[in-house]
Image (tube, rainbow, N blue to C red):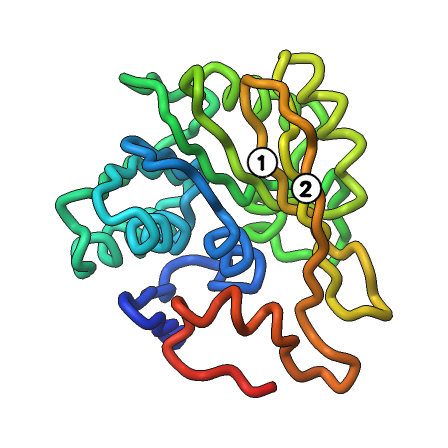
Amino acid sequence: MAQDFHFKHFTISQNRTALKVGTDSMLLGALVNAKSPKFALDLGAGTGVLSLMLCQKFPSLQVDAIEIDAGAYLDCLMNFEESRWSDQLNVMQGDYFNHRFSKSYDLIVSNPPFYLEKTADMKRINALAKHTSKEGFYTIIFRIKSLLAKNGSCWMILPYTQLDLLTGYVNQVSLFINRIVFIDAKKSKPNSRVIIEISNSFAQMKTSRLIIRNEDNSYSDSYINLTKEFHSKELKK
């Protein structure tokens, strides 16, 4: 049985899902920035960690979450029901490619399936959760375009190696990348991930860089300061 992951203001049960709370979600949820959003959508919600982080950041936010995997959906449902924001959270089990959403959203977050090749030794459930085709990746971007409110924004995390592909798809659907945060595992291991902000409006692109760990494997000051409002325990430097 997987151990619950305790945040400062909520707890994530992850007993039924194959994908546990990790650094990717922590980074994305902590970096998301928006101006007083009212309605948010968590595409591929997993256990609901991003939705709960959003509620902590934006106390009046209403969040819809959708998750296709039955086990992850049940974990997400329980995590929502046991949180202080239960009346602001709604989770649906289904495929967000085909689901008929009833509204547009001024904030969308997604930690999508972004690896384009499967390895032979990968567990099937992990492959389903984190792998897609180029066509599937394009469909995710097209779906975001159709669900994003005129003045809304979407935040995503993906491997640095997929940035050029995503940039091309964003251009194809007439969206714009407004911000890129380059994530380095360490200074000696640059460009592990990128976090991007996408919107319907052109703006001068802002870029920045964040290093997760120092060379001795301790957490960097930047990472500690970014995530300190979410981690239940003080991270060691």
Mark identifier at residue 61: none
Q: Is residue 236 left or right of residue 57?
A: right
Q: Residue at x 41, y 33 (%)?
A: 107
Coordinates of residue 135 in the picture (x, y in percent): 68, 22
Instruction: Indicate the quadrant containing the N terminus: top left, top right, bottom left or bottom right.
Output: bottom left
- Residue placed most toward the observer, 170 or 95: 170
Mark identifier at residue 197: 1
Tell whether label 2 touches label 1 (CB within 8 Å): yes
Q: Is residue 125 left or right of residue 220?
A: left
- Can you say whether 131 is above or below 121 in the image? above
Q: Specify the farthest residue to the right.
A: 188
- Residue placed most toward the observer, 17 or 84: 84
SS type, badge 2: strand
Q: Which residue is mark 2?
A: 180
Q: Earlier in the sequence, mark 1 or mark 2?
A: 2
Instruction: Indicate the quadrant containing the C terminus: top left, top right, bottom left or bottom right.
Output: bottom right
Q: Is residue 9 left or right of residue 135?
A: left
Q: Is residue 79 left or right of residue 194?
A: left
Coordinates of residue 211 in the picture (x, y in percent): 71, 66
- Residue placed most toward the observer, 3 or 16: 3
- Disc 1 marks which amino acid? Glu
Q: Residue at x 38, y 64 (%)?
A: 14
Q: Residue at x 44, y 15 (%)?
A: 150
What's the distance in space between the residues labelled 1 and 2, CA to CA?
Answer: 7 Å
- Can you say whether 47 is above or below 216 in the image? above
- Disc 2 marks which amino acid? Ile
- Residue placed most toward the observer, 28 or 95: 28
Count of all numbered marks drawn on residues in the image = 2
